[in-house]
Amino acid sequence: MIDLHTHTNNSDGTDSPRDLVNKAIAQGLTVLGISDHDTTSGWEEAVQTLRGDLALVLGSEISCLTNDGISVHMLGLLFDGAHLEMQVMLEETRDGRLPRMRKMIEKMKAAGIDISMDDVEAARPDGATLGRPHLADALVNKGIIASRDEAFQGMLNNESEFYVSHAAPTPTDAIQMIRRAGGVAVIAHPFASHRGQILQASDFHELVAAGLNGIEVDHRDQNPDEREMLRSIAHELDLVITGSSDYHGTGKLNALAEFQTSPAQWEKLESLADQRRVVRA
Ligand code: AMP
Ligand code: ZN
Ligand code: FE
Ligand code: FE
């Protein structure tokens, strides 16, 4: 069982890295990828918890914005965590998430919603990459909405009047940085259309030229038609096909390993990193 895309409480998941690794071992996963948004801060705890036969794939899900303002998530896996330029890029994105959150809160206040930055900070675990899910949790804590899911179906959706984007690298920049840091780049849920505007099939050529290695095809936010389109793009461009859960603990319905990557595709993806960086106990 290979699941390459999960989140911990170092971003908007609810399990600590320790809890996540323990769950993966208990469920019999063979390969677990940890990919918190715009950070590598959960890696160390995950490595310390590792035991038995589980193989750990350290990574990050990098928030990107195209020049047309389309939000894209890029999974960087197996890169060198000490790569300075990569860490600067991630830090800049994390920094940009603070003014962005303040702007969203201002818009909500202007609409008469009783929410403050302190409420959001109280809902964010220490050091976690700040995101809309923490704002959702703050709204839940104040009894304004019932769940994160309700927030993302309404007031926190990309199409909502309260939505504000944050500074982020372009998908091309992120791919090039991941590859320079020795890792592999897999575009996450590219056709998850209900989240907002998505890329076109023709956009993939440019990403491949930048060094894209794979496409996350099997993901709950993509329907069977979207998955088939992506599968054929991957075949045409000779890209690795992955499937993953995008597990967020209790922060999302996604169950660990609900979608998986085949051993053959994983082997191909791993061979494209500049070194063997999979962590084993
Ligand atoms: P942000 O990075 O701050 O723009 O927030 C986006 C994050 O919200 C994504 O990483 C998703 O994992 C999370 N998210 C999107 N939809 C939902 C949902 N329905 N329930 C919980 N979390 C969600
Ligand atoms: Zn998330
Ligand atoms: Fe994502
Ligand atoms: Fe994710």
Image: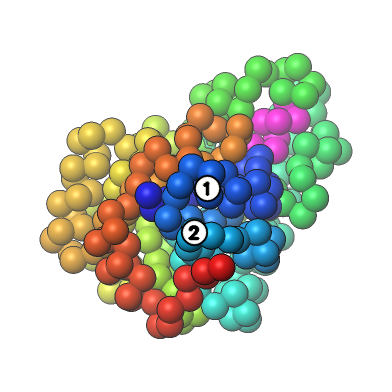
> In the rendering, at what x and y percent does residue 244 appear?
39, 47
Residue range in magenta is 133-139
As shown in the figure, which amino acid type bears the numbered disc 1? Answer: Ala
Residue 135, magenta (yes or no): yes
Residue under the image location 56 percent in, 68 percent down:
281
For marks 1 and 2 on the same chain, the one whose residue lies earlier in the sequence: 1
Residue under the image location 40 percent in, 82 percent down:
274
- Label 2 residue SS: loop
User: Which residue lies under the disc numbered 1?
Assistant: 24
Q: CA distance from mark 1 to mark 2?
A: 8 Å
> In the rendering, at what x and y percent does residue 18 appear?
67, 52
- The image's colour scheme reads rainbow
Question: Which of the numbered marks, if any, corresponds to residue 54?
Answer: 2
What is the tally of numbered marks visible in this picture?
A: 2
Residue under the image location 55 percent in, 32 percent down:
252
As shown in the figure, which amino acid type bears the numbered disc 2? Answer: Leu
Q: Are marks 1 and 2 in contact (CB under 8 Å)?
A: yes
Left or right relative to 37: residue 135: right
Left or right relative to 215: residue 83: right
> In the rendering, at what x and y percent does residue 81 appear?
59, 74
